[in-house]
Image: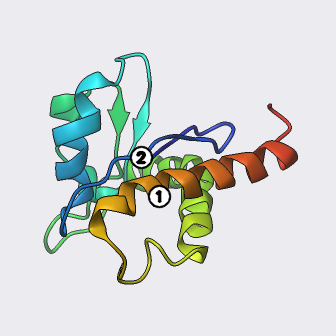
Amino acid sequence: MIVCGLTGKIICVACCEGRVHDFRLYSRSVGRGVSGVIKILGDSGYKGIAGLHANSETPAKRPNGGELGVVEKAANRHVRSQRMIVECVNAKVKVFKIASSGYRNRCRRFALRMSLLCGIINFENRRYSPFI
């Protein structure tokens, strides 16, 4: 799921069958078509995204047996503060239990239902967003 950091609007949803890590799904489907102007903020699971997208940022991981420096901690805090809107949208999706629990309906229709759910969330966000 790709979310606009300013408005909280869900821009794109990609789905596949079975359990697939988010970064692998991104690199297979959506990652090739994202413009280089767009800044991508990922969590620590998206460590290799800099090779696919030049304008991306992920938090720094603590080295084995060491600690992060003051600069790395400040950079991580900045990334976390920018990702808050995205995490709030993820929480709204998980309220509907389609992404948080096991999906028990036909797998063919999962992507359709997820897209419809994201449309409902975008409609609700439109009422409260000062940017739209």
What amino acid is found at the position of numbered circle 2 in the picture? Val
Q: Answer yes or no: do the residues labelled 2 and 1 have beta carbons within 8 Å?
A: yes
Is residue 43 positioned above or below 101 on the image? above
> Callout 2: 10 Å neighbours few (<14), some, many (20+)?
some
Task: Please give the name of the residue rendered at 57% of the width and 37% of the height, measured from the top-left corner.
Answer: 4
107 sits left or right of 66 in the view: right
Q: Position of residue 9 (x, y in %)?
A: 63, 41
- Residue marked by disc 1: 114
Circle 2: element type: loop
Q: Position of residue 24 (x, y in %)?
A: 17, 51
What amino acid is found at the position of numbered circle 1 in the picture? Met
54 sits left or right of 128 in the view: left
Name the residue nearer the viewer: 16 or 40. Answer: 16
Q: Quadrant of residue 132?
A: top right
Of labels 2 and 1, the one closer to you: 1
Name the residue nearer the viewer: 127 or 27. Answer: 127
- Residue marked by disc 2: 13
